[in-house]
Amino acid sequence: MKVLITGGSGLIGTALTKALLNQDIEVTHLTRYKNSKMGIKTYEWDWKKNYIEEGAFKGVTHIVHLAGASIVDKPWSMSRKRLIVKSRVLTARLLENEIRKQGLKLEAFISASGIGYYGAVTRAASFNEEDVCGTDFAAECCRQWENAAHKFEDITRVAIIRTGIVLSDSGGAVEKIKSSVKRGLGAPIGSGEQIMPWIHIDDMVAIYMNAIKNNSWDGVYNAVANNSTNAVFTKSIADALGKKMRLPKVPSFMLKMIFGEMAELLLNGTTVSNDKILKNGFQPSYTDLDEAMLSILS
């Protein structure tokens, strides 16, 4: 087995690479810039130039596609939106074209996606993998992202992982909220009742390991361990850090002034079901939020 990872230097990619190496599985990365991170072989690629370095696919049996510009790091200007979509869709298209050209016999293509597929909405019923795509920008981005992955289905087995909020001490939502809490600025945002579907980084990696190794992982899966409100999520971080939250909720209008359209991602959220991964034999190690937070922050 040899696994090629795009976006291997990101939060999930780094943790997954370590897990694969710990099991003596060969790993290589496609990267924009050559590096020796974790001592693995890297190959350059540039989707804007339609370029992949020669030899990148030699011996590769599995591809994990995690590459993509961050959705939440910068405001959504039109140019930023285009970059967010193209860095996911055109990279997948470049992979597909090169694989077809080389006649590569893959065992699986595993692609990230997001629970943003369902849209930034609040509703009573939980979302499952059969629900239709939302109508906002994040949903449309995920739809195009997944469509690009589905193009591999006549080549190999395809698994698409709709990722919830990943709990980690190395980045992501927890790191951003933790920073505010430590400075005494932690507070729920908007109503505080919007749902945040979450998963511990260890369980996130375990899902990818299952998707790589097990042929039963075929199709779309919600990578979520449990759901909590924004208020509970923020307090759990504060409790794990031994801090108090004294500030009132951050008003919705303030977030909209700061983040514009992207604020809807922060102000809305609905329960996402994990029934499918459970029925497929996966049991998350962390389903209690406070326990999960303590494991990464204590």
Image (cartoon, rainbow, N blue to C red):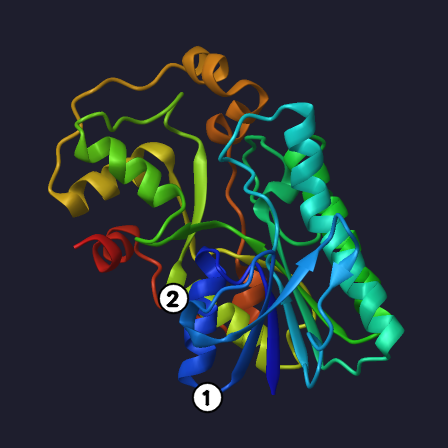
Percent coordinates x, y for residue 272 in the rendering? 53, 48
Image position of 279 (left or right of 90): left
Instruction: Identify the image quadrant of the N terminus.
Output: bottom right
Please state if 213 lies on the left or on the right of 39 as rendered.
right
Residue 183, x across and y down, in percent: 18, 29
Residue 26 x/y as whole percent: 54, 84
Q: Residues within 10 Å of mark 2 (few under 14, many from 20)?
A: some
Near-viewer residue (39 or 223): 39
Q: Amino acid at mark 1?
A: Asp
Kindly state the secondary structure of the residue where label 2 is placed: helix
Q: Residue at x 64, y 74 (%)?
A: 217
Q: Name the mark on residue 202.
A: 2
Q: Sequence order check: which comes first, mark 2 or mark 1?
A: 1
Checking the image for residue 74, the label placed there is none
At label 2, which amino acid type do we have?
Asp
283 left or right, relative to 89:
left
- From the image, state whether disc 2 or disc 1 is nearer to you: 1
Within the image, what quadrant is residue 143 found in? top right
Secondary structure beneath disc 1?
A: loop
**In the drawing, what numbered circle is on residue 24?**
1
Splitting the image into 4 quarters, where does residue 254 fall? top left
